[in-house]
Amino acid sequence: MKPKLFIPQPIPEAAVKRLERRCELTIYPYTDRRMPYDEMLEAVRDQEILYALGEIPYDRRVIEAPPKLRFIAAMHSSAKFVDKDAATERGIPVAILPSRIARTTAEFTFALLMATAWRLPEADRFLREGKWKQNQSMAFLGTRMFDKTLGIVGMGTIGTDVAVKARACGMRILYNKRRRFSPVEEAGLGAEYRPLVDLFREADFMVLTPALTKDTKGMITADLIALMKPSATLVNTSRGPVIDEAALEQALAEGRIRGAGLDVYEHEIPEAEVPGPSERMKSLPNVVLTPHMGSAARETREEMALRTVENIERFLDGKRPLDVLNPEVYGEAARHDERIG
C-alpha cells in the first residue's frame, strides 16, 4: 500500500503528480482560507507523512496525533511553524529547503519599491473609479528613482540583489549590515557603508531585508523613522517585527514620510487570528500593502515544491533527505540557526 501523505493547502500540480506515484494524498483544496485546526487534527490521524507549508502550525498536538507518522517535509527554509522538538522526541526527521527564494524576493522587493514610488495601486484605483479627467496635471504625481539614494538594511543575498537592480536604475546605494563588506566588495557593488542613523538620514528610499533574529527584532525604532526625510519611502520585505510598526503607521498618517510598501507585518499567521496591518494602516493612501507574497512567483513555488517532493522520495527510498532541520535524529550534530522567524 502507498503511504498516506497530508498536504494542508494546494501545491503546484507538477509536485502533486510526482507525489501521486508514491503516496496516497489528502490535500485541503482551498486557497482562500486556512484549514480549521480541529479539522486538521482529525485529518492527520492516519497519516504517515506530513507536508508542511504556508506557516500552518504543526505544533506538538498535530505531530503527536498520527501514531504512524514517520516524516515531515517542509516547503520552507526554516519551518519555524513546525515543532522541531516534538518531532525530534519521536525520532521523526523534518526536512526543509535551502534558501531558494532570494532572487525572487529581491525582484518582488524592487517591484514593491517601484509601485510605491509611482503610486501604482492608487493610480489603478483612480482610473477604475472614473476619476481620470485630464492629462499632464499636478493631480497624480509619483516620484522617480534615478539619481536618488537607496538605503538597504541587511545586505545579504536579497539586499545585494536589490542593490544590483537599483544601481542599474541609476540609484546611489548605501547599506548597513552586521559585518561590513570589504572595500573590494563595496566597489564591486557600488555601495557605501553607513551606520543606521546616517543611513536613515540620507536615504530617499529605504529597503529592509534582514533576517529576523534576536538582534534584528525591533531594530528599526521610532527614533530611526523620525530621522527619515519627509520625501522618503520605506519598503519592508524582511519580517514585520524588525520595525516598530506603530511608529511607522504614525509617521505615514502624519505625512512625516512620503510612503511605504509593506509585504510583512508585526502580526501574521499563525501567531495572529487577525493577521496583517491595522485598519488604520489599510486606510492610508500612501501605503502599498501586499499579503506576504515575496516568493510567490509560479516558477519559484514549483521549484520549492519539487525540492520538497525530492526529500519525500529520498525518505521513502531509505535515503537521508537533502536538508534536515533536526539532523540529531540521524545521530548528527544539531543545526544552529539564529533566525526566529
Image (spheres, helix red, strand yellow):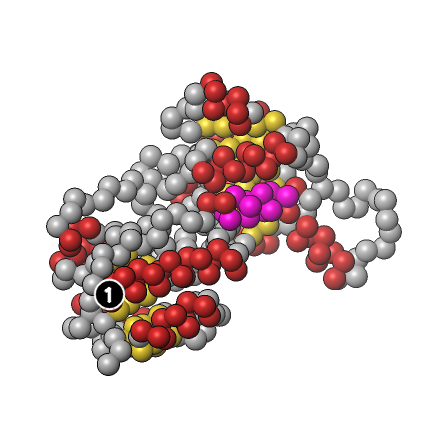
Instruction: Find residue 89 and report its image quarter.
Output: bottom left
**Where in the figure is residue 293, as x and y percent of width and height?**
50, 55
Instruction: Find residue 306 and report its image quarter.
Output: bottom left
> Within 10 Å of the Cα at label 1, are there few (<14), some (14-19), or many (20+) other Cα atoms?
few
Count of number-bearing discs: 1
Give me the residue at 59% from left, 37% from top. Answer: 165
**Where in the figure is residue 170, as x and y percent of width and height?**
66, 30
Give me the residue at 31% from left, 75% from top. Answer: 23
Give me the residue at 20% from left, 69% from top. Answer: 69
Q: Nearer the viewer, residue 266 or 283?
A: 266
Q: Is residue 138 magenta?
A: no
**Where in the figure is residue 337, as x and y percent of width and height?**
28, 42
Q: Nearer the viewer, residue 78 or 298?
A: 298
Which contiguous range is marked in magenta? 104-114
Residue furthest bottom in the image:
1
Q: Is residue 341 visible?
A: yes
The residue indicated by pointer 1 is: 317
Q: Nearer the viewer, residue 255 or 233?
A: 233
Residue furthest top in the image:
183
Specify the amino acid type for callout 1. Answer: Asp
Left/right placement of residue 235 relative to residue 90 reads right
Q: Main secondary structure of the magenta part?
A: helix
Name the quarter where the N terminus is drawn.
bottom left
Q: Is residue 108 magenta?
A: yes
Q: Is residue 308 above or below residue 255?
A: below
Q: Secondary structure at mark 1?
A: loop
Q: Is residue 260 visible?
A: no
**Where in the figure is residue 218, as x and y percent of width and height?**
39, 38
Q: Nearer the viewer, residue 115 or 259?
A: 115
